[in-house]
Image (spheres, grey):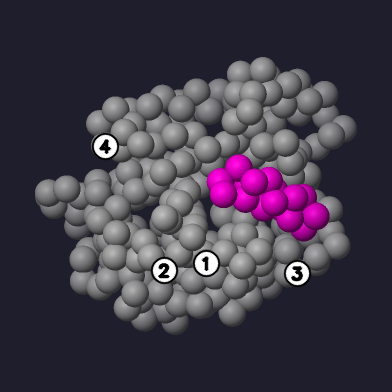
Amino acid sequence: MTCIIAIANQKGGVAKTTTAINLGTGVAAEGKRVLLIDLDPQGNATTGSGIDKSEADAGVYDVLTESAIIRAVRVISPTSGYDVLTANQHLAGAEVELVGVNGRETILKRALESVTDDYDFVFIDCPPALSLLTINGLTAANYVIIPMQCEYYALEGLTDLVDTIKRIKSYLNPDLEIGGLVRTMFDGRSSLSQQVSDQLDTHFGDKLFKTVIPRNVRVAEAPSYGLPVLVYDKMSKGAIAYRSLSTEFLTRFT
């Protein structure tokens, strides 16, 4: 049975897309069949997977507007070992177009039903906002993974995100659960980072992944080459951490 994971955080700049790309790459490297859905109009998960978003003929926009099915528009990442449902700026218009559509919150969920036999894991890279796109991602998912920096504002925003997840669970997706929290861009020299990390451990316990993703230059460089850091520099601290996270993820979800 396919496990669908939404990677979400209402706060931007927390390595959400980086986590989606590298977790997908790490899991695919272990022989799992993976689909990455880029649900952000910026299309960063698309370009980070080695795909030119400007040349993609069709993608998630066409699936959400029900003019194409996933099998017809998915593409193979040339770098990462998984399939991609691409995004570009056209996706920004989908929310306006879907305003009057009945069942608009469940379009992605229904579309994924046709490919449940094709994949072991589907990762959905949600945009950094509580939009109709994010709601579609959360409604389609079994679990949410939350990447977050260990800083005050990120902790404050986490409360809002957890409330959002509870509302989605109550009204649209009763099976939705928090699958885990990932500490990203972690600066071990900062006492604040350690304090926030300790608070997360206290409040979320086993939900908190043990693996911590450090702040690392190679992780930041990799997307400009259209590569996950796991491919760009396998021996960097960031790659080692994401490989560890992939192993921990598989232990938790298989």
Q: Earlier in the sequence, mark 3 or mark 1?
A: 1
**Residue receiving disc 4:** 172
The label on residue 33 is 1
C-alpha separation, residue under disc 1 versus residue under disc 2: 7 Å
Q: Magenta region's main secondary structure?
A: helix
Q: Earlier in the sequence, mark 4 or mark 1?
A: 1
Residues marked 1 and 2 touching at CB (< 8 Å): yes
Residue range highlighted in magenta: 238-254
Front position among marks 3 and 1: 1
The disc labelled 2 sits on which kind of residue? Answer: Asp
Give the residue at mark 3: 232
SS type, badge 3? helix
Does residue 87 appear left or right of residue 222 in this picture?
left
Which residue lies under the disc numbered 2? 118
Q: What amino acid does circle 1 point to?
A: Arg
Residue under the point 34% across and 48% down: 140
Q: Nearer the viewer, residue 223 or 19?
A: 19
The residue under the point 78% across, 25% down is 194
Q: Position of residue 106 (x, y in %)?
A: 25, 49
Indicate whether 76 appears above or below 168.
below
Which numbered disc, 2 or 3, marks the residue that appears first in the sequence?
A: 2
| Label 2 or label 4, whichever comes before in sequence order | 2
